[in-house]
Amino acid sequence: MRTKTDAEIPIVWLLLPLASYLLWAVFAVAWWSAGAGLGTSGLTPVISGLGILGIAASAAGSYVVFRLVNRANEHSGRTQALLSSALSSLAARSGASGAQALLTLNSAEEGFYKLSRSERERSAVLWALLSLIPFVGWIFLAVSLWRLSRDLAKHSRLESVVLEDVDRTLKNTGTQGVLVRNTPVRTHDTLGFALVILSIVELFSAFVLGLAGSLILIYLTVGAFSLFWIDLSIRDPTDHFHYHSQLEADMLRALPDSTSGGMGFG
């Protein structure tokens, strides 16, 4: 289950959306040239071929989006299952360990409640299908990655609070604590706001380049930002996922009864 939940997506997969981006960029330029009557009537078969290749490349690129969103969903579900099981086990132990253990356990349960309430599963299939749409799909792709980075950042922050309380509760019950290490995931809000501002500015370039030229410029900008964002989305959570492989081993050692009920951790 470890490999499936926190699978590392190879960075080489970035080539799939890159191919889609380049093909649709060439398609847009060829279509614009043909529409402008620049003596390119022979480009019609080329444009058709580029469109077919672009759709195929978009399908491959949308699969990367699916994997990124689905990986985050599975990690969130796994974390909640692990913490819920650990808290149940600690509740059975803390009653005989004094008020301090109960106090930290109560704090951990409150933190877990906030974590579980703040997270909800994103539809990986929906976002993959939206990103499949030629040209416009890159806007959906950027939105999905922005939301994904914000979700992971919040998850990391709230999870850390719960784990600190779990660690203190374990120590208050006379058990060795678990590894608590801060592994923040960045939200990339600056990147998102920069993309929005640039897109608005480029929209006004229609007065100079015409509407078609402005839209092509926006596509090139959104696509370039999205490619960079895909790279960040692949790399950024890696440290957090590696930390979980150590954390779950600690949980198994400290609370073997919490992981023996078919959870399959470790």
Image: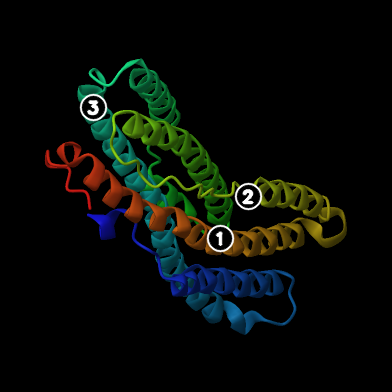
Q: Which element carries disc 3, helix, strand or loop?
A: helix
**Mark carried by residue 195:** none
User: Mark 1 belongs to which amino acid?
Assistant: Leu
Residue 132 seen from this side: no
Q: In x, y percent, where is residue 203?
A: 77, 51
Which is more N-terminal, label 1 or label 3?
Answer: 3
Residue that carries the numbered disc 3 in the rendered image: 88
Mark 1–mark 2 CB contact (< 8 Å): yes
Which is more N-terminal, label 3 or label 2?
Answer: 3
Q: In x, y percent, where is residue 85?
A: 23, 33
Residue that carries the numbered disc 2 in the rendered image: 188
Q: Nearer the viewer, mark 2 or mark 3?
A: 3
Mark 2–mark 3 CB contact (< 8 Å): no
User: Mark 3 belongs to which amino acid?
Assistant: Ser
Instruction: Identify the residue shown where x is 34% and y is 49%.
Output: 247
| The N terminus: image quadrant | bottom left
The part of the image, by quadrant, that contains residue 107 is top left
Q: Residues within 10 Å of mark 1 (few under 14, many from 20)?
A: some
Residue that carries the numbered disc 1 in the rendered image: 232
Q: In x, y percent, where is residue 222?
A: 65, 58
Instruction: Identify the residue shown where x is 66% and y is 45%.
Output: 189
Q: Which element carries disc 1, helix, strand or loop?
A: helix
